[in-house]
Amino acid sequence: MFNVKKHIPNTITCCNLISGCIATYYAFLGDFRLALLFIIIGAVFDFFDGMSARLLGVSSPIGKELDSLADDITFGFAPSAIVFSYLCTFHIHLPFVPFLAFVMAAFSALRLAKFNLDERQALGFIGLPTPANALFWGSLIVGLHDSGFTFDGLEWVILAGTFLSCYLLIAEIPMFALKFKHWGWKGNEIKYIFVLSCVPILLLLGITGFAAIIAWYVILSIASHKSTPKSV
């Protein structure tokens, strides 16, 4: 007998993958707003596929592998395509330079593979999550492109930023997740500070605020890790 319930999470995961493919298509067209929109839609599907698998009790090894594949398309390849297309708008004398953006897709795949094998990431993350990285680049490029903001050497700053994000994806840096064991202030200080600060950032910066929020998330994660007493 065909078990419909068993296929619901994988179907949602495939919707994530398809969203990533559409985002990549619009990225190559230079329509960065629609590319970002489909990355966000993919993130919504990514949130619900895991939730549905747990609620329905139908988690499976193939679902885990399919999820990583979909995530690398939506949160690895699609943002790389956005950066690639944006770099192509500059008059760079070295034609291979924009293609370096796709290194980020490779590091996203590596980060996802590490996540699948790392048992330390149940309540937090080690390294920057791929959806956060994708949201950063998508919103940043949309903001830069729509505003027309530029300066001499911006393309090299963007390229340096992609390599920095590649490092952050696989770095052994603990980063907090918005998971609450309780709703009290103690123990959740960093999470509440982060959530409360997101609203004014978005009101002030608009869509580019998402990039600022991700940068703020990384800074808070590093700061909170540095301030945590080391066990002897």
Image (tube, rainbow, N blue to C red):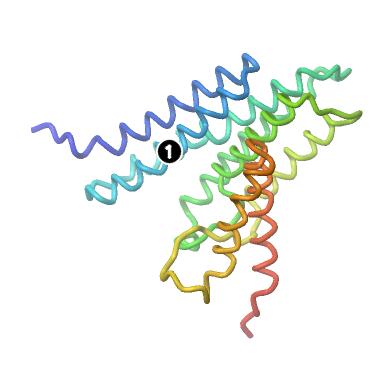
State the residue in front, 157 or 230.
157
Residue located 25% across and 50% down the image: 55
Q: Residue furthest top?
A: 29
Q: Quadrant of residue 107?
A: top right
Q: Residue furthest left?
A: 1
Tell which of 130 and 210 is nearer to you: 210
Picture layout, residue 70 above or below residue 127:
above
Residue 169, position as x, y percentages in the image: 63, 47
Quadrant in which residue 156 is drawn? top right
Q: Residue furthest right?
A: 152
Q: How many marks?
A: 1
Q: Pick whichever, 167 or 178, lies toward us.
A: 178
Residue, disc 1: 44
User: Dividing the picture into quarters, in which one does residue 78 lie?
Assistant: top right
**In-image side of 98 versus 180 (left or right):** right
Left or right, 209 with respect to 151, comes to left
* Residue at 64% over, 59% down: 172
Q: Position of residue 146 (x, y in %)?
A: 71, 24
- Where residue 223 appears, x then y in whole percent? 70, 65
Which secondary structure, mark 1?
helix
